[in-house]
Amino acid sequence: MRLTKQTNYAVRMLMYAAANKDHLSRIPEIAKAYGVSELFLFKILQPLTKAGLVETVRGRNGGIRLGRPADKITLFDVVRVTEDSFAMAECFEDDGDSDCPLIDSCGLNSALRKALNAFFDVLSGYTIDDLVKTRPQINFLLGIDEFSGRQVISAPAAPVATVPVPAA
């Protein structure tokens, strides 16, 4: 099973917003941080907003923020919203178009269903907060300080030693 780019970037977008929790995050900034198109992120934003994972603020100084605390958004919440199908084999499809005579009594179907449920259980055990708090440098890596209007505080300059100049 492979998750779509939509799911991958939805998680990344939520991580960005969580790392930037004291400010609104703007799509152009997120797109620049991840090297992806703004249009693609706007497409992902719709299902995240509809599910309440993200809130949007319109206007000149608008942007996005998490719709609920980062420790309350699981990876399963994101995957459930962004993935279209979890069919691991044709017999998982709901369209009844399978020609397999074992469709209702297949061991493969049962095994795949257990594997999928285990996958969902693991995703349910991780939150966006878990992904962000384990990376203390995330704001630097994403360039958040550059965009947020916060000044990056640099180390004070070393004192300059003065050398007395002999009188001529």
Image (cartoon, rainbow, N blue to C red):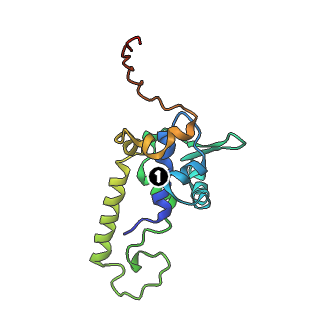
Residue at point 56% right, 46% down? 54
Describe the element under mark 1 as helix, strand or loop.
Answer: helix
Quarter of the rendering containing residue 108: bottom left
**Residue 16 % position (x, y):** 49, 45
Dot 1 crowding, Cα within 10 Å, few <14, some 14–19, many 20+? some
Q: Considering depth in this image, is 132 or 138 the residue closer to the camera?
A: 138
Farthest residue to the front: give it.
Answer: 168
Q: Residue at x 59, y 39 (%)?
A: 24
* Quarter in which the C terminus is drawn: top left
Residue 39 percent across, percent down from the top left: 62, 60
Count numbered badges in the picture: 1
Residue located beneath label 1 in the image? 12
At horizontal 49% and vertical 32% (from top left) the residue drawn is 152
Q: Which residue reaches farthest top? A: 167
Residue 83 locus on image (x, y percent): 48, 64
Q: Is residue 50 left or right of residue 112?
A: right
> Which residue type does callout 1 highlight?
Arg
- Which image quarter holds the N terminus? bottom left
Residue 137 lies in quadrant? top left
Q: Position of residue 81 (x, y in %)?
A: 51, 57
> Does 7 sit above or below residue 106?
above
Q: Is residue 113 above or below residue 123?
A: below
Whether residue 74 is situated above or below residue 166 in the rendered picture: below
Q: Residue sitting at 37 percent across and 87 percent down?
A: 100
Residue ranking furthest to the right: 59
